[in-house]
Structures are given as structure tokens and as C-alpha cells.
């Protein structure tokens, strides 16, 4: 059975914003290896559109960017959206009966499926489908933006803390 893991970079004040702060190089290396080990990734529409950045090589990319893109492209992706009509390579659109589709993925696959996008994560949390939450806490204060939790924070139990690089801490929670 696959495990659904919701994880994102977060500021000290609880916001996510990929344009306001980026992972340092050593943490980016960690994410490359993490994606390499995944069974696949499950996206909401908004986060999928952000991640489509990795579909095309850009001339200013360094070796790490090219490696991440290759690993990301190789993984199956499932995109939950009622507004999209199609998705890119190695991606499957889930437009109807989201709960049944996700339960099917969990029961048919093994390993970790990463969930990205706070709105999708909130919906899956309400359905009891998220198995683990990973917060990559950065020493940045944004003061505004999109919060990590799109709705009320579910009851959680801290199971691990890891200093990954410099001052970025990975907090791992499971439903209480």
C-alpha cells in the first residue's frame, strides 16, 4: 500500500511561496534524491502548473537543475483538476471521483506518493487520506501569502525532527 505524504517548504510564519525563498543548494540535492525514491507525485492544478517549469530544459540551468528535471520527468504524476482538459507527459488527469481514484492509487501502488498543493492536501486530509506531513521549515518570515494548511490544521503528532542543511529543519507529523 502506498503512503501519501504532503510536504512543502514553509516560512517560520507558516507560508509557502516558491518565488520568495528557494532551497539552498545542499537542500536541493536532498530533494533530488527524495524525488528519485518516490513512487510518484500527486498535484493540485495550481502546484502542477508551477512544477511544469521542469518539463523543458532552460539554457541557464546548472547541472543540478538538469538532474532534478530528469528525475521529475521520469516519475508518474497524477493531477487533480476539474478545470484542466489535459496534462503533460507522464501525467494522468483525475477530474472525477477524486476520493475513489486516490484510494485506488494507495491500494494498488507501493512506496511514497508525494502530495503537493495545500488545497489538494486539505481535501485529502478531510478524507483521511494523508499519511504523513513534512514541513521543511526555513528561517524566513514572509508576513503574508498562501499558508501551508489551506484550512484548519488537523490533529497531528510529531514523529521526527531533522536538521537537513544549515538552518532548515524537516518536521515530520502523522495524524493523531
Image: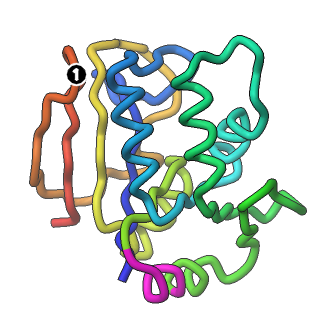
29 and 152: which is toward the camera: 29
Quarter occupied by the C terminus: bottom left
Q: Residue furthest right?
A: 85
- The answer to whether residue 81 is above or below residue 152 is below
Secondary structure mostly taken by the magenta-highlighted segment of the chain: helix
- Residue drawn at x 20%, y 16% is 167
Give the quadrant of residue 131. bottom left
Q: Position of residue 126 (x, y in %)?
A: 42, 69
Task: Sort mark 1 into few (<14), some (14-19) or many (20+) by Cα contacts within 10 Å.
Answer: some
Quarter occupied by the N terminus: bottom left
Q: Where is residue 91 in the image (x, y as percent from the top left)?
A: 72, 62
**Which residue is identified by label 1?**
165
Q: Where is residue 112 in the image (x, y as percent from the top left)?
A: 38, 65
- The answer to whether residue 58 is above or below residue 141 is below
Task: Find the magenta span and give its range.
Answer: 104-110
Give the quadrant of residue 136. top left
Q: What element carries label 1?
A: strand
43 and 108: which is toward the camera: 108
Determine whether, in the image, residue 101 is placed left or right of residue 114: right
Residue 44 included in the magenta stretch of the image? no
Q: Which residue lies furthest to the front in this view?
A: 63
Give the quadrant of residue 69. top right
- Residue drawn at x 24%, y 23% is 168
- Residue drawn at x 54%, y 48% is 117
- Residue drawn at x 55%, y 52% is 119
Amino acid at each position: 500500500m502506498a503512503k501519501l505524504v504532503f510536504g512543502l517548504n514553509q516560512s517560520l510564519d507558516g507560508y509557502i511561496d516558491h518565488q520568495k525563498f528557494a532551497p539552498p543548494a545542499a537542500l536541493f540535492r536532498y530533494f533530488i534524491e527524495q524525488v528519485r525514491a518516490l513512487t510518484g507525485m500527486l498535484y493540485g492544478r495550481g502546484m502542477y502548473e508551477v512544477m511544469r517549469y521542469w518539463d523543458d530544459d532552460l539554457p541557464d540551468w546548472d547541472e543540478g537543475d538538469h538532474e532534478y528535471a530528469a528525475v521529475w520527468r521520469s516519475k508518474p504524476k497524477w493531477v487533480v483538476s476539474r478545470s484542466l482538459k489535459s496534462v503533460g507527459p507522464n501525467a494522468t488527469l483525475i477530474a472525477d471521483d477524486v476520493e475513489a481514484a486516490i484510494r485506488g492509487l494507495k491500494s494498488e501502488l507501493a512506496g511514497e506518493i508525494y502530495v503537493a498543493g495545500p488545497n489538494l492536501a486539505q481535501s485529502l486530509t478531510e478524507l483521511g487520506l494523508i499519511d504523513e506531513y513534512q514541513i521543511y521549515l526555513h528561517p524566513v518570515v514572509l508576513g503574508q501569502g498562501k499558508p501551508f494548511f489551506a484550512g484548519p490544521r488537523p490533529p497531528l503528532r510529531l514523529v521526527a525532527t531533522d536538521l537537513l542543511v544549515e538552518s532548515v529543519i524537516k518536521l515530520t507529523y502523522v495524524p493523531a
